[in-house]
């Protein structure tokens, strides 16, 4: 197994674990906030998929699925996300108030978007050559090489997976009480 085959295996298994956790969530579970500054599960799922979409765009130069497939027209961002902040349509640097305003999309839409993004990511990984892993795809971020983006695809989703598990645990305790 070479390094790109490992990346393919890791992102496939990580996404499978995420989908197993969230595939039957109710609307209430998707929108539950453990506190006024906490992120709901649905927002975290959206954020993971949006970030991966952004990474794929960075590594391929292709338009993000978010725009190309019309998701940006379907899902409304908080009105405060304008101007230079519009580049932050992944949810990074949003305030708790902005997260609270964000309307979490229905689970089926989130999963469909995530699957589209994942298929693009897998095609990208399968088409990449090992000797390209050390190239810098974005001159504005010279410290991030292709391998850094691929590593982040794995660790970013895995980290948020753990948050989702924790939030759902809190939800279950609160709803049982």
Image (tube, helix red, strand yellow):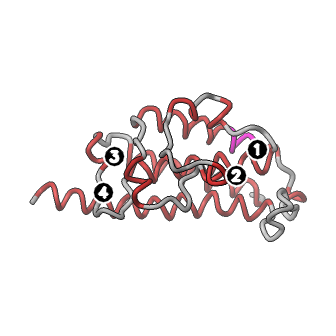
- Marker disc for residue 98: none
Crowding at dot 2, Cα within 10 Å, few <14 / some 14-19 / many 20+, comes out as: some
Crowding at dot 4, Cα within 10 Å, few <14 / some 14-19 / many 20+, comes out as: many
Residue under circle 3?
A: 30
Identified at 80% across, 45% down, the residue is: 60
- Look at the numbered discs 4 and 2 and tell me whether their residues touch, using CB distance below 8 Å: no
Crowding at dot 3, Cα within 10 Å, few <14 / some 14-19 / many 20+, comes out as: many
**Is the residue 75 above or below the residue 41 in the image?**
above
Report the magenta residues as a range: 120-124
Residue under circle 1?
A: 124
SS type, badge 2:
helix
Residue 90: percent from the left, percent from the top?
58, 51
Between discs 4 and 2, the one toward the N terminus? 4
- Look at the numbered discs 1 and 4 and tell me whether their residues touch, using CB distance below 8 Å: no
Residue under circle 2?
A: 55
SS type, badge 3:
helix
Between discs 3 and 1, the one toward the N terminus? 3
Cα–Cα gap, marks 3 and 1: 30 Å
């Amino acid at each position: 197994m070479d390094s790109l085959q490992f990346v393919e295996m890791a992102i496939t298994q990580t996404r499978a674990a995420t989908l197993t956790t969230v595939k039957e969530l109710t609307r209430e579970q998707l929108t539950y906030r453990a506190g006024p500054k906490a992120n709901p599960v649905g927002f975290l799922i959206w954020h993971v998929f949006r970030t991966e979409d952004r990474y794929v765009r960075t590594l391929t130069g292709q338009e993000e699925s978010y725009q190309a497939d019309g998701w940006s027209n379907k899902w409304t961002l908080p009105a405060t996300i304008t101007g230079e902040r519009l580049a932050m349509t992944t949810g990074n640097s949003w305030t708790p108030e902005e997260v609270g305003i964000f309307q979490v999309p229905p689970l089926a839409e989130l999963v469909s978007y995530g699957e589209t993004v994942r298929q693009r990511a897998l095609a990208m990984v399968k088409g990449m050559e090992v000797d390209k892993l050390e190239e810098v795809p974005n001159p504005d971020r010279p410290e991030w090489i292709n391998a850094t983006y691929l590593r982040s695809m794995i660790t970013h989703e895995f980290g948020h997976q753990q948050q989702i598990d924790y939030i759902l645990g809190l939800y279950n305790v609160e709803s049982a009480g």
